[in-house]
Image (cartoon, grey):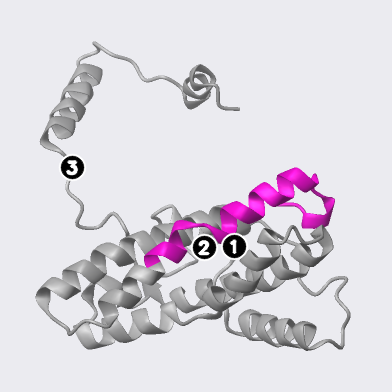
Amino acid sequence: MKNIMEMDPIEALELLNILVNDQIFAARERLIVLLNEPPSAENRQALETEFREFYCGYESLAFFLETYEEDPLEGLPPHTSLSKKIKRQREYILANRKTTLDERMSRRAGAYMHSDPMPEKKISELPTDEYRKLLRMLVSLELFSVREPFLALLAQNAPLAELDVAFREFFVAYELLELALEAYHYDPDEGLEMRPEFLKELDQRIADYEAGKAKLIPAGEAFKKLGID
């Protein structure tokens, strides 16, 4: 991902609007409502369903942000309160982060690299009190408070230079969310059931391939047919 100021203005605005309207924000509001309800088996199930949406929103944010390599402090006046805050947060992130970018990207793809041992804490197995405590911490992170002024700037058609500063604050807040999740293992597909008709078709396709009645299509050829570069 390029520096916002180096992007085409229309392209930059489209990207920023995608980021601030990601599904994680709507899921967060629904989680807050559920967390204000008394604990119960039904509430736990509803929380787990909504957290899956929240986590998938985090994954979609990561899709855009994980390859952003700019220093969020580069070019900012060093003595402003915002610069000092971002510097303090970045130092905390870099001092406490235990994974590499490749390891984090692999985790989000549902796998662990040999260099990245699976975290001991599995979110789906947390006791209800601990689970609710984790969710309350996540929905209270700074990503959700910095979004509102960012949205206001976009609504005001603020200059790109102002939006660039807001984006840097947003990016560091995203990294804090990423760091908060680092100590936990979570698979959003765990527990989801495949439809019987899909499983039947999958078994048939595997049987056809093993019997020599079908052949595999190389990924490059499949992408070409779908019009994907």
Magenta stretch: give its range: 1-27
User: Residue 40 at x, y = what percent?
Assistant: 12, 80
- The residue beneath circle 3 is 194
As drawn, is 63 to the left or to the right of 14?
A: left
Q: Where, by quadrant of the figure, is residue 125 drawn?
A: bottom left
Q: CA distance from mark 3 to mark 1?
A: 31 Å
Q: Secondary structure at mark 2?
A: helix
- The residue beneath circle 1 is 101
User: Residue 150 at x, y = what percent?
Assistant: 65, 68
Residue 141 visible? The answer is: yes
Q: Amino acid at mark 3?
A: Met
Q: Amino acid at mark 2?
A: Arg
As drawn, is 56 to the left or to the right of 85?
A: left
Quadrant (top left/top right/bottom left/bottom right) for the C terminus:
top right
Residue depicted at 28% across the width and 83% down the height: 132
Residue depicted at 28% across the width and 80% down the height: 35
As drawn, is 205 to the left or to the right of 112?
A: left
